[in-house]
Image (tube, grey):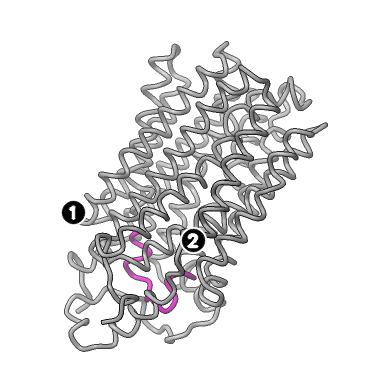
Amino acid sequence: MTPAAVFGIRANLGQVLHQLLQVLLVGMTIGMMRNVVPALAESEFGVPRGSFMLLVAFVVAFGFVKGAMNFVAGRLAERIGRKQVLLVGWLVAWPIPPLVYFAPSWGWIVAATVLLGVNQGLTWSMTQTAKLDLTRADQRGLVIGLNEFAGYVGVAIAGVATGYAASLWGPRDGLMWFGAAVIGLATLLAWIGVTETLPWAQAEVKRHATPTAQSLRPRYPSGVSEQPTTREVFALMSWRDRRMAALCQAGLVEKFVDALVWAFWPVYLHQQDVGLPGIGWIVGVYGFTWGAAQFFTGKLSDRLGRHQLNAWGMWICGAGVALMPLGSGALWWSASAAIAGLGMAMLYPNLSAAVADIAHPNWRASAIGIYRFWRDLGYGIGALGLGAAAALGGQLESAFWFVAVAMLVSGAVLYRWGEETHPRLNPAT
């Protein structure tokens, strides 16, 4: 067996660690925009108080751009390789810190966020796809849990760090130098340390062709060609296969929570007279809980299955969102953030793992890209929805109820339409 055909975390530990460091830095890149920027939208960037739709414009832009780039990244990675797409993603991020530093208006922040969407769509997709290339089917929950653990710990670290940096040096200087250091280091490490993993995916295709590989064959969608077109994979993921459609709609709706956390949680807490470091810590509880718990929930799904964790995660996360405006004080807000983060940890890696379970290696990168397209489109659709809810209700709290109800309904759809995808627990007959 050639080295490129050796699968498993232990056998490829060096590259798995390189990819985990990459996704940590990817998370820190988006994290630097999730605390200081929305909290100071009015005082620093000229967004009028109560302009809910203008406030969410940068999240809307991010969601639609990142969703589209996820779609592009999956197909592109099957043609030019994972490492090349990763490097392009980092090069696109270079103008973000100076755009924020010199921004005379909110429009510049929206422009910076468009580039951030391109960066995140290309880089985060590739870190996940590359690790799935390297590992075995019985490690998918664990490896995606590790990937999202590292990424969202990076988001939380950056939120706290930029809160302190903005207090010490000013918001523009703090974001400029923090962002430049993270993006520069990530580009260098991707260039010198990351190995192309496309040969592992190609070796897996050959292995699936052997008779011994059929004993625990996943329930792949039927009626799919060996090399399906982009249109075929998109239709399969979006409506043709009910299981994939259930996963995609759940991914889309769960991003309503992240849009709320990004656009409105810092503003809501700022209006409650919480300082920037305090906002960073409260929002950080959500990110740290989400990140750390995924280390366990991803592995748990490899043992117990994905389906129940995904559905209950939707409902628990929605409950955490609903609790936020029902009380006051740092302890209450932190507890609600932790509940939302726990629910997100239950569903986030395991929705992706479920897609990977029943996507053939020939088109797995495309399937993941299309799932991530629908999922991150939830940033844009969710931000529009919560902005409209806040505008119609006349207060930020209305956005919390909109998101909580959406999570409840989406979880019910997932529970009804979905099924267990783990090949050991529900193999093809």
Seen in the picture, residue 412 relative to 374 is either above or below; the reply is: above
Amino acid found under the numbered disc labelled 2: Met
Instruction: From the viewer's perspective, tell me whether residue 244 is left or right of residue 384.
Output: left
Q: Secondary structure at mark 1?
A: helix
Q: Is residue 429 magenta?
A: no
Gap in Å between the C-alphas at discs 2 and 1? 27 Å
Of badges 2 and 1, the one in the foreground is 2
Q: Nearer the viewer, residue 387 or 354?
A: 354
Residue drawn at 32 percent across, 85 percent down = 206
Choose top left, top right, bottom left or bottom right for residue 245.
Answer: bottom left
| Residue occupied by mark 1 | 304
Residue 229, percent from left and from top: 54, 81
Amino acid found under the numbered disc labelled 1: Leu
Choose top left, top right, bottom left or bottom right for residue 344.
Answer: top left
Seen in the picture, residue 100 relative to 147 is either above or below; the reply is: above
| Residue occupied by mark 2 | 126
Residue 34, percent from left and from top: 57, 33
Query: Which residues, given as a range, are shown in magenta?
Result: 353-367
Residue drawn at 46 percent across, 55 percent down = 249
Quarter of the image with the C terminus in it: bottom left
Seen as rendered, the residue at the extreme right is 104
Sequence-wise, which precedes: disc 2 or disc 1? Answer: 2
Instruction: From the viewer's perspective, tell me whether residue 251 is left or right of residue 222.
Output: right
Q: Secondary structure at mark 2?
A: helix
The circle on residue 198 is none
Residue 306, percent from left and from top: 27, 55
Residue 39, percent from left and from top: 63, 24
The majority secondary structure of the magenta stretch comes to helix
Q: Residues within 10 Å of mark 1 (few under 14, many from 20)?
A: some
Residue drawn at 23 percent across, 68 percent down = 423
